[in-house]
Amino acid sequence: PELRAAITDFIVLFDSPMGIQEDFFNYCQGASDLYRILIPESSDSNWLIVPDGMLYRMPFGALIADMEARAGGSFTYMLEKGRVNYGYSCRMLFRNARDLDLGSGLWFAPLFESGEQGLRPLPHSASEMSNIDFSMDYDTLMGEVATRESLIKNLPYAAWAQLSTHAQDLSAEGAFLYTIDSSLSLADIYGLSLQSDLIVLSACETDRGVYQ
């Protein structure tokens, strides 16, 4: 019960954009305590995490591995100590261990270099796929070709997809995923006939809403 409460108290700090800034002391304390409890002291610097239950919402990379530099205002986060990988299904992990042919994927990255739709540029999106350390076959929709129409046309046929873009939860109006020229609502996405085994959404406000 105490561990569950500690995890809950930590996770809720991410429920609002200013949650961590408004309670930075408790974030630091919680991030450090949970790292000490959840991560074995002798573990190496590469982790494969298969979360269960409420741990699905745990941002392990944000845990603080070293609090020694606290007085100087800097910390060593778990993400800085090595690679943090997530496996959300043991069945999929076992299947992929037997067959690494993931099929043709889709990389969608509008970049917003000119501040289209009043959104901030995302220059680092251009290098996200280069950080993946194994070869995969995928189509690229980047920059001005990353339109609403192209995403709707190509996403249903992708075996997997990486969507590096802006997203926003407007509560009463719903959640939106932005393309270079428009957006898709959650209803639009649910309306697509998707065949993908895995879709990664690399965007802000992706942890909003009620956990069920």
Image (cartoon, grey):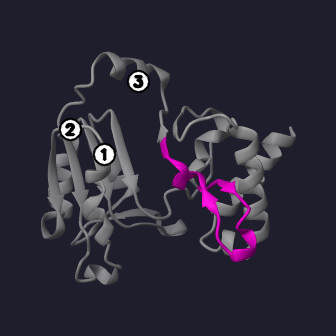
Q: Quadrant of residue 16?
A: bottom right
Residue bearing the label numbered 1: 132
Element under disc 1:
loop
Name the kind of residue labelled 2 in the image. Answer: Met
Q: Are marks 2 and 1 in contact (CB under 8 Å)?
A: yes
Q: Does residue 23 show up? A: no
Element carrying mark 3: helix
In whole angstroms, how far apart are the C-alphas of marks 2 and 1? Answer: 9 Å
Residue 197 vertical position relative to residue 111 in the rendered view, above or below: above
Q: Position of residue 98 (x, y in %)?
A: 32, 15
Upstream in the sequence, badge 3 or badge 1? 3
Residue 74 in view here: yes
Residue type highlighted by circle 1:
Ile
Q: Quadrant of residue 23?
A: bottom right
- The residue wearing badge 2 is 136
Residue placed under numbered mark 3 in the picture: 92
Image position of 46 with respect to 203: above or below: above
Q: Measure how far apart labels 2 and 3 are at the Cα level.
A: 17 Å
Instruction: Look at the image and say whether residue 73 sits in the magenta stretch.
Output: yes
Q: Secondary structure at mark 2?
A: loop
Q: Residue at x 67, y 56 (%)?
A: 64
Q: Residue at x 31, y 51 (%)?
A: 131
How far across and down, in percent of the image, does residue 86 sit?
48, 38
Q: Which residues are magenta?
A: 62-84
Picture residue at 67% right of the left edge, 39% below the top: 39
> Which of these two is toward me, 76 or 87?
76
Quadrant housing the C terminus: top right
Task: Name the residue at the top extreme.
Answer: 98
